[in-house]
Image (spheres, rainbow, N blue to C red):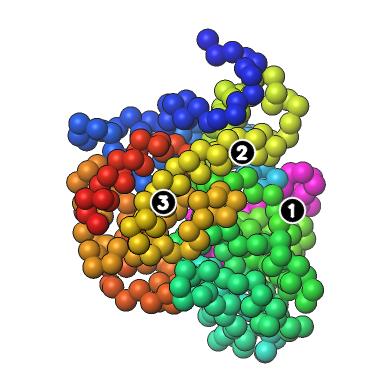
């Protein structure tokens, strides 16, 4: 039996973590498959799977009606909404809309679509010459929707990466903004460069000119607890299917922002903040299953810190404690891989630091004459799943001079990966490179 009050952990119990993910037990050969394309989508813990199965099995009805299953369906969705808010620490300040629901967290089918809807909501408020700053480091989802607003008269300015590592220099930003700048869009950590951008510093630049700061956190949220208040942004977006949850996109907006933008939902819902930026109805089962993400974090918290501790901390604080353990483990994963690649003279996209304070354990590199396809096929033959291409960050790949149509190779680890899996990957890379 698990000790209800163990000595607080200093290391992540990876065996316990992996036991929560049914897919990790799946094997198609003599050794388990190693999933190292987590930046494209993570495995699901049993908590999310069980909630999804239960909802679809027993509560697939129109929610919030008086009948028993419908009432329960509504309750399950409310729990999912509350859990979503907790992942941003959005419940800390008690943000609620006028209907008393969990405020400022909007759920859509993907971050790409949420960003597009947000851009359309802002478009009608623009005047000719209003400025929008985008980078060429981001996934196209946080670039394309904003660039299209040039057709509405917006002036688009690009915060450009350096041509060597694909990194952004904060010193370059101030020259791009003025009192006509309305929006600054930047990734928290690129899905290829994977290096943490100084969001709080960018927020100060945005605040000085009264601009809205929109942060794409898709590639950072799987690796850290997100505190929107400390970041100082106006909008933060991430995808739950990359944070061990169902295939949905979450968009947090600062209190009152949704009411300042043009309504994108049904006209009769215009007075409901949560409906203004969600033009379509949600996937009910997926909304309910989002609660499984936080249930999973609580599972890890109880295992590592004891069953009596949760009552003393807010949900976000528990999530943050878990991610402190995750950070140490993920640094242990990426260090030997980065050391191997840099030792071989391989060109890394983003910072070559092995510090978790500087980057995520998503390692993208130029495989040189070997070619991306050959590397990916060789690793697949060794039971290791990685990817190659531009990963929807085509502008970044172009900016750093990668002309090979096979693109770059990306190896992306998360906390359920093991040191042994990284060692097997290095061995396979050594053979093919």
Asked if the residues shown at circle 3 and circle 1 are in contact, with their CB atoms under 8 angstroms apart, the answer is no
Mark 2 sits on what residue?
324
Mark 3 sits on what residue?
339
Residue in front for this viewpoint, 420 or 254: 420
Q: Earlier in the sequence, mark 1 or mark 2?
A: 1
Residue in front for this viewpoint, 215 or 407: 407
When asked about the image quadrant of residue 33, the answer is top left
Residue 227 horizontal side relative to residue 68, left or right: right
- Residue 221, visible in the rendered structure: no
Label 1 vs label 2: CA separation?
Answer: 17 Å
Q: Earlier in the sequence, mark 3 or mark 1?
A: 1
Q: Earlier in the sequence, mark 2 or mark 3?
A: 2
* Identity of the residue drawn at 57% across and 55% down: 358
The answer to whether residue 97 is magenta is: yes
Badge 1 marks a residue whose secondary structure is: helix
- Of marks 2 and 3, the one in the foreground: 3
> Which portion, as a residue range, is magenta?
90-115
* Identity of the residue drawn at 22% across and 54% down: 432
* Identity of the residue drawn at 74% across and 59% down: 232
365 up-or-down from 9: above or below: below
Residue at the outermost front position: 343
The answer to whether residue 110 is magenta is: yes
* Identity of the residue drawn at 36% across and 51% down: 340
Mark 1 sits on what residue?
230
């Amino acid at each position: 039996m698990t000790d209800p009050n163990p000595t607080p952990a200093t290391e992540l119990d990876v065996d316990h973590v992996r036991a929560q993910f049914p897919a990790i037990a799946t094997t198609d050969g003599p050794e388990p498959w190693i999933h190292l394309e987590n930046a494209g989508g993570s495995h699901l813990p049993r908590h999310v799977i069980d909630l999804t199965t239960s909802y679809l099995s027993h509560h697939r009805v129109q929610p919030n009606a008086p009948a028993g299953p419908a009432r329960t369906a509504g309750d399950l969705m409310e729990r999912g909404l509350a859990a979503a808010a907790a992942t941003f620490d959005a419940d800390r300040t008690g943000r609620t809309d006028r209907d008393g629901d969990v405020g400022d967290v909007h759920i859509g089918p993907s971050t790409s679509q949420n960003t597009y809807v947000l851009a359309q909501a802002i478009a009608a408020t623009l005047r000719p010459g209003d400025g929008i700053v985008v980078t060429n480091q981001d996934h196209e989802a946080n670039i394309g929707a904003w660039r299209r607003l040039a057709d509405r008269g917006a002036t688009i300015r690009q915060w450009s990466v350096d041509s060597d590592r694909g990194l952004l220099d904060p010193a370059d930003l101030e020259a791009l903004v003025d009192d006509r700048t309305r929006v600054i869009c930047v990734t928290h950590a690129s899905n290829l460069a994977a290096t943490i951008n100084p969001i709080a510093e960018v927020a100060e630049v945005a605040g000085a000119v009264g601009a809205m700061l929109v942060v794409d956190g898709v590639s950072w949220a799987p690796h850290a607890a997100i505190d929107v208040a400390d970041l100082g942004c106006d909008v933060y977006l991430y995808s739950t299917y990359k944070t061990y949850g169902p295939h949905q996109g979450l968009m947090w907006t600062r209190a009152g922002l949704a009411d300042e933008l043009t309504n994108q939902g049904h006209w009769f819902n215009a007075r409901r903040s949560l409906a203004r930026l969600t033009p379509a109805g949600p996937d009910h089962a997926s909304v309910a299953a989002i609660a499984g993400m936080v249930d999973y974090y609580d599972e890890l918290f109880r295992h590592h810190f004891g069953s009596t501790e949760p009552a003393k901390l807010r949900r976000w604080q528990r999530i943050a404690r878990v991610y402190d353990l995750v950070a140490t483990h993920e640094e242990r994963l990426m260090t030997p891989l980065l050391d191997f690649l840099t030792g071989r003279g391989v060109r890394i996209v983003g910072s070559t630091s092995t510090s978790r304070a500087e980057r995520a354990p998503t390692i993208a590199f130029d495989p040189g004459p070997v070619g991306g396809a050959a590397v990916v096929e060789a690793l697949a033959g060794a039971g290791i799943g990685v990817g190659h291409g531009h990963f929807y960050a085509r502008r970044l790949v172009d900016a750093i001079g990668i002309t090979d149509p096979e693109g770059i190779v990306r190896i992306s680890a998360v906390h359920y990966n093991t040191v042994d899996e990284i060692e097997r990957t290095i061995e396979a890379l050594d053979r093919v490179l």
